[in-house]
Image (spheres, rainbow, N blue to C red):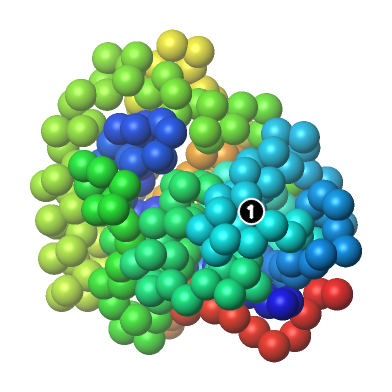
Amino acid sequence: MKATAIAPANIAFIKYWGKRDEKLRIPANTSISMNLSAAFTSTTVEFSKNLSRHHIELVDEMFSDKEISRIVLHLDRIRDRAGIAQFAKVITKNTFPKGTGIASSASGFAALTVAASAAAGLSLSEKELTILARLGSGSACRSIPNGFVEWTTGEESDDSYACSLYPPEYWDLRDILCIVETKTKEVSSATGMEFAQTSPLWETRQNEIPERIAQLKQALREKNFQLFGEIIEEDCLSMYKVMNTQVSPLFYWTKTTEDCIKEVQANRASGTLAYFTIDAGPNVHIICEGNSEKKVVDRVKRILGVQSVLINKPSVGAHLIKEHLF
């Protein structure tokens, strides 16, 4: 059987940096995110008795050997669950560059999980799909449910899953994604996270997160954009302080990253509320309400070094579609 799924990348408002269980990809803390309408992965999977091995292809880009090994492991995990022996042909395509801190592993493994599960004949609940996607890439579980999503850390595999807090149409927000770098980063998020707990600021961050989550949920509930924005910037900078001070410190930002941050601050000074957040990479997500979109976009497009801009609204999560890539 052949199946195709689309899954969005997501931007974490409360981020996770570090794992409680490396093998099961259980995060050190709960996180909250929003799915992105213009940054997504499409994946077609077909299991066939005519194949002697898995065939995996990324349209217009290349997977590394390590990435292929992770995909094969996930396919085999799904084959074992479905009780099938056939190998799979997988074709996948992104609307944005992978490996640059825009959650391509999240959208990629979410799309792979939904498509491969359907192609293998599995019928899984949303919760089960989030758990399965998490085993491929932790943040992939957040790309399964719709809209604004919470990923609960949990103690064991079965209670570390994601669910929707609000549907996409709940709040008319924009994620103005400023792409300042398209090259794959030298140190992946997965590798960088292995050293998170070596930072002297690690414990402080972990202690602060529960209150930050409570405040963000309040901001979402009340649609209090100023409170919302202040919290997401605070959490972003908190994560980067850990990254910058851990053993083998990470410095993903570029000058253009910093210029985008300054532009956000200039927007606020001129009366246009906008806030930034950045995952593990140089590219900047500028969050604003829908009525501020044009002003924000017009200004960031003038920043030297911004290669392109993706305008995202809150999006539905991973889902099957009828159109196949092969």
Residue 60 image point, x, y percent: 87, 57
150 with respect to 227 (left or right): right
Q: Quadrant of the C terminus?
A: bottom right
Residue 179 image point, x, y percent: 66, 53
209 with respect to 22 (left or right): left
Residue 288 visible in this rendered orientation of the protein: no
Residue at screen point 39% across, 56% down = 131
Residue at screen point 20% across, 24% down = 203
Count of number-bearing discs: 1
Which one is nearer the viewer's eye here, 199 or 155? 155
Residue at screen point 45% across, 56% down = 132
Mark 1, residues whose alpha carbon is within 10 Å: few (<14), some, or many (≥20)?
Answer: many
225 with respect to 128 (left or right): left
Residue 121 image point, x, y percent: 58, 75
Which one is nearer the viewer's eye here, 104 or 306? 104
Residue 199 lies in what quarter of the image?
top left
Would you name the residue on which mark 1 appears? Answer: 75
